[in-house]
Image: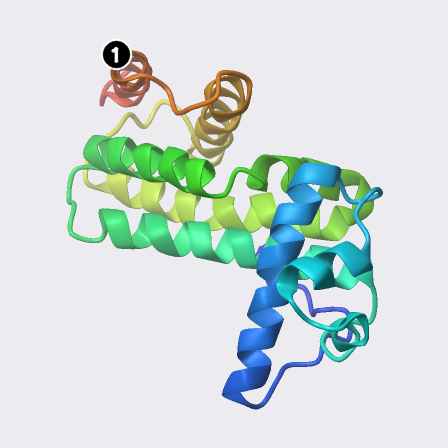
Amino acid sequence: MRGAETPAAAANLEPQTAKGRATREAILRAAEDVFGEQSYYRASISEITRRAGVAQGTFYLYFPDKQAAFVELVHLLNQNLRREIRTAIADLEDRIEMERVGLQTFFDYMADHRALNRIVRESEFVAPDAYRWHYTSFARGYVEGLEEAQRKGQITDAISPETMTWILVGIAEFAGSHWEFWGGGPPPPDVFDEMMTFVGRALRPGREQ
């Protein structure tokens, strides 16, 4: 899948020393907060560097401009989220249980990175290639996992893995928006159980749900 490959960072300078890597990480952490609070267009490099505790000129040692830092942040948040989900489900065999643990991990990550939703949604307009990459890279592994579960007979084969993937991504995205950002917290346990009841019935093997 071509869109699932990581786009080359826009001339970002990769630091060669531990101090440089730490400075770059501090800038990105500050950028996550500032973009999440103020939006891309209102955010300023001066505010990002102030929060990072570095001189404004230091920013340009690592990123040519504000958009490059924004794109790198989309990549970083995406990669960290996918890694956390992979780690959480690594020892599981049952696909429905993987969905439960993966969805809970997704909500936990959103709670820890509350700027994620706003940054990704803004990227549709600020950096469309990064926006597309975010979803296609996430979907690629999802499709592969569902294909394997179908081969094992763990989930229905009445729906293609690709269609199933985008439905499940949509559930996670908008449920996350509703409770995490409009409701101020993750879905309550009873709501989460209801969501998994819905997902479990939809994925159950066989054509009759």
Among the 4 quarters of the image, the one containing residue 107: top left
- According to the picture, the residue beneath numbered tag 1 turns out to be 190
Horizontal arrangement in the rendering, residue 140 relative to residue 48 (left or right): left
53 above or below 1? below
Location of residue 30 with respect to 157 vertically, above or below: below
Badge 1 density bin: few <14, some 14–19, many ≥20, Cα 10 Å: few
Q: Camera-side residue: 196 or 54? A: 54
Q: Position of residue 68 (x, y in %)?
A: 76, 63
Residue located 25% across and 48% down the image: 88
Image quadrant containing the C terminus: top left
- The one nearer the camera, 51 or 68, is 51
Marks counted in the figure total: 1
Judging depth in this view, the residue of 2 and 172 nearest the camera is 172
Visible residue check, residue 157: yes
Q: Amino acid at mark 1?
A: Asp
Q: Residue at x 32, y 12 (%)?
A: 191
- Can you tell which quarter of the image residue 56 is in? bottom right
The quadrant of the picture occupied by the N terminus is: bottom right
- Image location of residue 90, percent across then percent down: 22, 53
Residue 82: % across, % down: 42, 51
Q: Secondary structure at mark 1?
A: helix
